[in-house]
Amino acid sequence: QKEVEQNSGPLSVPEGAIASLNCTYSDRGSQSFFWYRQYSGKSPELIMSIYSNGDKEDGRFTAQLNKASQYVSLLIRDSQPSDSATYLCAVRVERSQGNLIFGKGTKLSVKP
Amino acid sequence: EAGVAQSPRYKIIEKRQSVAFWCNPISGHATLYWYQQILGQGPKLLIQFQNNGVVDDSQLPKDRFSAERLKGVDSTLKIQPAKLEDSAVYLCASSLDPSGNTIYFGEGSWLTVV
C-alpha cells in the first residue's frame, strides 16, 4: 500500500463548479497534512495545511481531514480556469523522520 | 524577499556523465531540502539539511548521488555517474522552521539523461 494515494485524474469541472480532490494515507500516526498546487512546468506551491479533524477554509479553498478514515480532501469552490493545475497531497509521516511524503497528484482541468 | 534560487535550470547529459546542481535557499532558512520529481510523480525527498548537518538522507542513492551544504547556506547536489532513470526535475526547497510546515520550492533543475 502506497503511503499517500491520490486519483491521478484528470479531473475536469466546468468553470464555477466545485472541484473535489481526494487523498488517502496509510500512516495512522500522521499529524500534518498539506495541499500543494503545481502548474505545468513550475514548482509546487503550498496552498493549504491542516492538522485537526474537520474543515479549514481559506477563501475558495476548503481542506477537510478525517483521521479515523485516514482521508484528507480539498474543495475548490467557484472553480476558475486559473485553478487548472496538478494538486499534490503531502503528509508528514512520523516514521520517516517527520518528512513529507507526496502523492502523485491529481490533475485538475477547469473548462471555461 | 528573494525565493529559492537554483541553477542550471536545464541540463542534458549522456548516461555515465556527471552533473551538479546548485541551490541558494531563502535568506535565513536553516533547513534545506533536495527533492527528485520524476514526470507524473510527486516529489521524493533525497536529502534534508539543518544548517550544514544532514538530517535525513535515507532515500539518497549514495552510490551515485552526493550533496553538501558546507557553510550552512548554499548547497550542491551531484550525480556521478548518471543513469537514464535519473531524468527528473531536481527541486531545492527551504524552510525557516525545522518542522518544515511551510516549505518554499525553487523553480527546479530539469535533467535529461540520454
Image (tube, coloured by chain):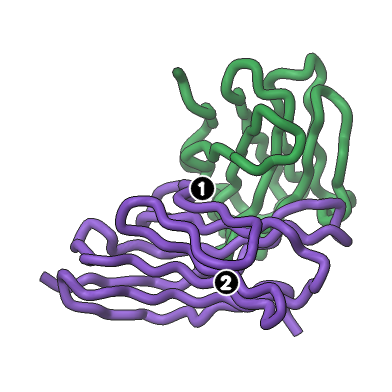
Chain colours: A purple, B green
Q: In which quarter of the image is residue B94?
A: top right
- The image shows residue A77 at horizontal and vertical percentages of 28, 66
Tell me which amino acid carries mark 1: Trp
Distance between the alpha carbons at the discs numbered 1 and 2: 30 Å
Residue B42 seen by the camera: yes
Q: What residue is at 58 percent from the left and 56 percent from the top?
A: A50
Q: What residue is disc 1 on?
A: B110
Q: Mark 1 lies on which chain?
A: B
Question: In what element is the residue under mark 1?
Answer: strand
In the displayed structure, A105 sits above or below B79; it is below
- The image shows residue A65 at horizontal and vertical percentages of 59, 69
Q: B1 or B35: nearer the eye? A: B1
In the displayed structure, A49 sits above or below B71; it is below
Q: What residue is at 10 percent from the left and 70 percent from the top?
A: A112
Q: What residue is disc 2 on?
A: A72
Q: In which quarter of the image is residue A53?
A: bottom right
- The image shows residue A22 at horizontal and vertical percentages of 50, 77
Residue B84 seen by the camera: no
Q: What residue is at 55 percent from the left and 77 percent from the top?
A: A6
Asked whether disc 1 touches disc 2, contact meaning CB atoms under 8 Å apart, the reply is: no
Question: In what element is the residue under mark 2?
Answer: strand
